[in-house]
C-alpha cells in the first residue's frame, strides 16, 4: 500500500531537484532529436477517413461489394461538370462544352481521367435532352481512375478547371461537383489549415497569457512546452501512419493540435499558481516546486487520465470518423500527460523565480497576499452563504436552455457543411434547383443470386414486376432501365443490366426527394425492411435471390444508423468511466455523482443554447449529425479538469477548516486559475471559427460556449453551491477516510 506513496515522493523530489529537472529537459530534447531522425511528420500520412464502418459490413458496403464484383469497372470517383448560363445555354456555350468533351476524350486529357460522357459525339436532339427544362444547365460526367490518392484527385480536377477556365466566355459558369469534386474541395479546405490554426492558436494564447500575467517568460514558457510536446506527438503519429499501425485522420490532427496547446497551457497554469503560492512560503525554488507537485500532480494525473480514457473509449465506435479519432487523441493525451508531470515542473524549476519577472514572488509574503479579497473570494462567500438560491437559479437557467435540445435537427448532407462559394457546393446547388432531386445520386438496386440465373421470359416478367412494385412504394420517380413489352416477350435483358456471371441484375432508382434528406433515408430504410415482401410479391423466392441497395442514400442511411449506435455507446461508457474515476479521486460516490450530473447538465444546456443561436440567429435549419458526439466527448472530458482542481483543493482545505469554509476557500483559491484556464481553452477552440468548414465552425462555437458556461457558472458557482448543501454527507465520508476535520 505504501509503494505508490513512496514512488510519488521519490518522483516529486527527483523532478523538482536541479539534477532531476536537467535530466528531464535533456531527455525530452534527445527524444525529439531521435524521433526527428527516425520518424516522419504526420502530415503526409493524414487522410480523410470517409463515412463508412470500420468493419466495412454495413448493408450499403455489402451492396457496393456486390456491384464491384459483379459489374467490374476501371472507373473510380465521378466528377460532375456543371455548365450553367443564367439566361440560357447559347450556341457559343454549346461549342465550349463540345470542345471540353473532345479534350476529355482525347489523348491530351489529364492522365488520371478514365472516361467521360462523349457529349461531342451525340446527335443534337440527344444533347438537348441532357439540358435542364429551363435550358440553363447541362451536366457532363467524368470518371477518374480507381484508388487515386487525394492529391492526385485534386491535381486532376485542377487541370480540368484550368482548361475549362481558358475556354469559358460570356456568362457561362462551370462548377465541378460529385464525389470527386467533394474530395478535391475537401483537400482544398484543409490545405495549410494546420499551419494557420497553429499560428492563430499560438498568437492567441500568447496574448491572453501576457494580459493575465504581464510577464514575458510566463507567456512564452507554456508555448515552448506545448511546442516540444507537439513535436513528439507529431513524429509518433507520423511513424504510426507510415507503418500502418493506425489511420491518421486529417480533421483529428487539426483539433488535436488545438487540444494539445490548450490542455498543456491549462496544466502550466495549475503548476504556476501553486508554484507561486509555495515560493511565497520558502526561499528554495526546489522545495517550492516539490510542494507544488505534491498538490497538483494528482489532479493533473486524474484529469489527464479521464481525458485519455474518454479518447480510448472512442475505439468502441464503429463509425470511422469517431473511431479514427481514437489513436490520434489517445497518443496525444499520453504524451501530454507525461509532459504535464515532467516537462512543466522541470522547466519551471530550472527557471525558478525568474519566470515571474517583473512580479517576482518573495518568501514570507503569503500572509499579505491572503488578506486581499478578490472576485472569486467574494463569489465563494456568496455561493456558500446562499447555496439554495444560487443552485436554484442556475438549475432553472440550464434546464430551460436544455429544453431546446428536443427541437434540434441534424443534417446528413456533407455538402451543407461546405462554404457556399466553393465549387462542389455551387455545382450541387445548381443541379438541385434545376434537375429532379433524386438524379443527383440515384440508388442502385441489385438482385443477387448464389447461382447463375436462367434469363427467360419468366425471369424478365419477375424483374418487370419488381420494378413496378418498387415504383408503387411511393417517393420513387423512376426505375431504370424500363423493360418494354418487346423485351419481356423476347426474353432478353438490356445491355449491362445482367452481370457476366449471370448471378446479379442491376436496377437504378431515382428518388423524388433529395438523396441526402431525411425523407429519402426513411424511404430507403423502408425498402430494406420490405425487401423480402417485394421479392415475394414479384414472384421471386427470397431463398434464391436477395435484394440490396447501394449508392449515396444507402450509405447515408447506414451513417445515421451507426451514428445512433455510437452516440448511445459513447455517451454511456464515457459517463460511467468518468464517474468511476471521479469517485476514486474524490473518495466519495455522492460527490462524484454530483460532479458528473452537473457536467451532463452543462453539456445539455450548451447544446440547447447553441441550437437556439444557430437556428434563430444564424439561420441554420439543421446542423451536422456529428456535433453532439464531438461536443460531448471533448466538453465532458475537458470539463473534468476543473472539477478535479476544485474538489482537490476543497479536500485539502477541509483538513483545516469546517466544510462551508473549505468550499469557500476552494472556490477562492482555485477560481482565478480555473477561470484563466477556461478563458484560454475557450479562446483556442474559438480558432476553429475561422475555418471554412461549417462543422468545424459550429463545433468551435459550441466548445467555446460550453467551456465558458462550465468554467464560470457550473464549476464556479453551481457545483460549490450543491457541495455546500450536501456538506453533511461529505463530512461523514471525510471521517470515514480518516481525514481530520475542523469541528463545527
Image: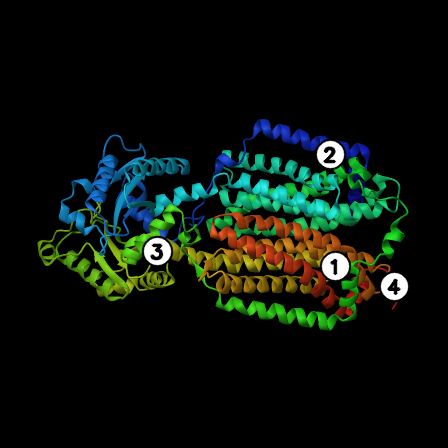
Of the pair 38 and 519, the residue shown nearer to us: 519
Instruction: Identify the residue at image location x=14%, y=46%.
Output: 124
Res. 81 in view: no
Whichever of labels 4 and 1 marks the residue nearer the N terminus, that label is 1
Whichever of labels 4 and 2 marks the residue nearer the N terminus, that label is 2
Instruction: Identify the residue at image location x=59%, y=40%.
Output: 199
Res. 382 in view: yes
Q: Which residue is mark 2?
A: 24
Q: Residues within 10 Å of mark 4 (few under 14, many from 20)?
A: few
Determine the CA span between mark 3 and mark 2: 54 Å
Q: Residues within 10 Å of mark 2 (few under 14, many from 20)?
A: many
Position of 565 relative to 43 (above/below): below
- On the picture, is 654 further left or further right than 448? right
Q: Which residue is mark 1?
A: 587
Q: Which mark is residue 742?
A: 4
Position of 697 relative to 30 (above/below): below
Q: Which residue is mark 3?
A: 553
Determine the CA span between mark 4 and mark 3: 65 Å
Amino acid at each position: 500500500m505504501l509503494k505508490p506513496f513512496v514512488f510519488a515522493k521519490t518522483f516529486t523530489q527527483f523532478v523538482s531537484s536541479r539534477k532531476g529537472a536537467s535530466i528531464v529537459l535533456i531527455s525530452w530534447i534527445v527524444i525529439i532529436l531521435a524521433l526527428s531522425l527516425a520518424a516522419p511528420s504526420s502530415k503526409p500520412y493524414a487522410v480523410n477517413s470517409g463515412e463508412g464502418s470500420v468493419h466495412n459490413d454495413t448493408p450499403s458496403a455489402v451492396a457496393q461489394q456486390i456491384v464491384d464484383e459483379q459489374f467490374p469497372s476501371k472507373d473510380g470517383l465521378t466528377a460532375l461538370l456543371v455548365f450553367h448560363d443564367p439566361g440560357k445555354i447559347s450556341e457559343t456555350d454549346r461549342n465550349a462544352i463540345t470542345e471540353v468533351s473532345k479534350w476529355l476524350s482525347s489523348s491530351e486529357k489529364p492522365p488520371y481521367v478514365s472516361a467521360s460522357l462523349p457529349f461531342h459525339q451525340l446527335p443534337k436532339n440527344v444533347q438537348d435532352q441532357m439540358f435542364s427544362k429551363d435550358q440553363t444547365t447541362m451536366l457532363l460526367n467524368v470518371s477518374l481512375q480507381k484508388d487515386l490518392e487525394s492529391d492526385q484527385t485534386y491535381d486532376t480536377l485542377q487541370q480540368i478547371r484550368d482548361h475549362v477556365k481558358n475556354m469559358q466566355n460570356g456568362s457561362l459558369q462551370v462548377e465541378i461537383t460529385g464525389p470527386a469534386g467533394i474530395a478535391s474541395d475537401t483537400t482544398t479546405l484543409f490545405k495549410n489549415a494546420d499551419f494557420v490554426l497553429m499560428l492563430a492558436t499560438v498568437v492567441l494564447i500568447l496574448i491572453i497569457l501576457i494580459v493575465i500575467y504581464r510577464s514575458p517568460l510566463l507567456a512564452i514558457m507554456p508555448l515552448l512546452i506545448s511546442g516540444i510536446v507537439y513535436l513528439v506527438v507529431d513524429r509518433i503519429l507520423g511513424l504510426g501512419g507510415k507503418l500502418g499501425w493506425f489511420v491518421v485522420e486529417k480533421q483529428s490532427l487539426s483539433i488535436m493540435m488545438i487540444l494539445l496547446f490548450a490542455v498543456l497551457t491549462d496544466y502550466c497554469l495549475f503548476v504556476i499558481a501553486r508554484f507561486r503560492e509555495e515560493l511565497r512560503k520558502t526561499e528554495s525554488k526546489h522545495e517550492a516546486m516539490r510542494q507544488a507537485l505534491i498538490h497538483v500532480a494528482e489532479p493533473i494525473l486524474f484529469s489527464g487520465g479521464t481525458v485519455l480514457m474518454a479518447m480510448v473509449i472512442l475505439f468502441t465506435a464503429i463509425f470511422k470518423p469517431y473511431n479514427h479519432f481514437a489513436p490520434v487523441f489517445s497518443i496525444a493525451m499520453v504524451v501530454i500527460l507525461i509532459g504535464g508531470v515532467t516537462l512543466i515542473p522541470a522547466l519551471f524549476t530550472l527557471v525558478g523565480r525568474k519566470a515571474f519577472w517583473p512580479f517576482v514572488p518573495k518568501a514570507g509574503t503569503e500572509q499579505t497576499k491572503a488578506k486581499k479579497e478578490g472576485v472569486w473570494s467574494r463569489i465563494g462567500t456568496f455561493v456558500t452563504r446562499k447555496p439554495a438560491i444560487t443552485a436554484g437559479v442556475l438549475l432553472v437557467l440550464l434546464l430551460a436552455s436544455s429544453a431546446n435540445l428536443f427541437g434540434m435537427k441534424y443534417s446528413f448532407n456533407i455538402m451543407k457543411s461546405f462554404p457556399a462559394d466553393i465549387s462542389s457546393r455551387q455545382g450541387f446547388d445548381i443541379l438541385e434547383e434545376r434537375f429532379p432531386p433524386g438524379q443527383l445520386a440515384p440508388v442502385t438496386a441489385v438482385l443477387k443470386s448464389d447461382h447463375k440465373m436462367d434469363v427467360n421470359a419468366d425471369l424478365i416478367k419477375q424483374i418487370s414486376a419488381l420494378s413496378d412494385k418498387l415504383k408503387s412504394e411511393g417517393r420513387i420517380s423512376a426505375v431504370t432501365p424500363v423493360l418494354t413489352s418487346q423485351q419481356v416477350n423476347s426474353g432478353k435483358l438490356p445491355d449491362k443490366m445482367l452481370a457476366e456471371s449471370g448471378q446479379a441484375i442491376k436496377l437504378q432508382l431515382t428518388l423524388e426527394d433529395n438523396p441526402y434528406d431525411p425523407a429519402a433515408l426513411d424511404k430507403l430504410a423502408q425498402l430494406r425492411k420490405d425487401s423480402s415482401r417485394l421479392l415475394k410479391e414479384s414472384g421471386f423466392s427470397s431463398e434464391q435471390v436477395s435484394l440490396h441497395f447501394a449508392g449515396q442514400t444507402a450509405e447515408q442511411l447506414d451513417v445515421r444508423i451507426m451514428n445512433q449506435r455510437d452516440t448511445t455507446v459513447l455517451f454511456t461508457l464515457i459517463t460511467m468511466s468518468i464517474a468511476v474515476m471521479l469517485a476514486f479521486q474524490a473518495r466519495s460516490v455522492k460527490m462524484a455523482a454530483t460532479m458528473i450530473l452537473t457536467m451532463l447538465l452543462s453539456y445539455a444546456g450548451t447544446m440547447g443554447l447553441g441550437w437556439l443561436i444557430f437556428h434563430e440567429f444564424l439561420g441554420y435549419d439543421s446542423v451536422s449529425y456529428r456535433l453532439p458526439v464531438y461536443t460531448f466527448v471533448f466538453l465532458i472530458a475537458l470539463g473534468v479538469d476543473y472539477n478535479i482542481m476544485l474538489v482537490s483543493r476543497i479536500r485539502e482545505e477541509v483538513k483545516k477548516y469546517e466544510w462551508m469554509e473549505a468550499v469557500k476557500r476552494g472556490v477562492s483559491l482555485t477560481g482565478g486559475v480555473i477561470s484563466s484556464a477556461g478563458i484560454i481553452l475557450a479562446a483556442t477552440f474559438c480558432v476553429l471559427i475561422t475555418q471554412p468548414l461549417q462543422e468545424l465552425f459550429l463545433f468551435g462555437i459550441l466548445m467555446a460556449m460550453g467551456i465558458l458556461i462550465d468554467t464560470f457558472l457550473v464549476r464556479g458557482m453551481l457545483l460549490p453551491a450543491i457541495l455546500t448543501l450536501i456538506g453533511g454527507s461529505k463530512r461523514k465520508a471525510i471521517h470515514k477516510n480518516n481525514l481530520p476535520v475542523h469541528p463545527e
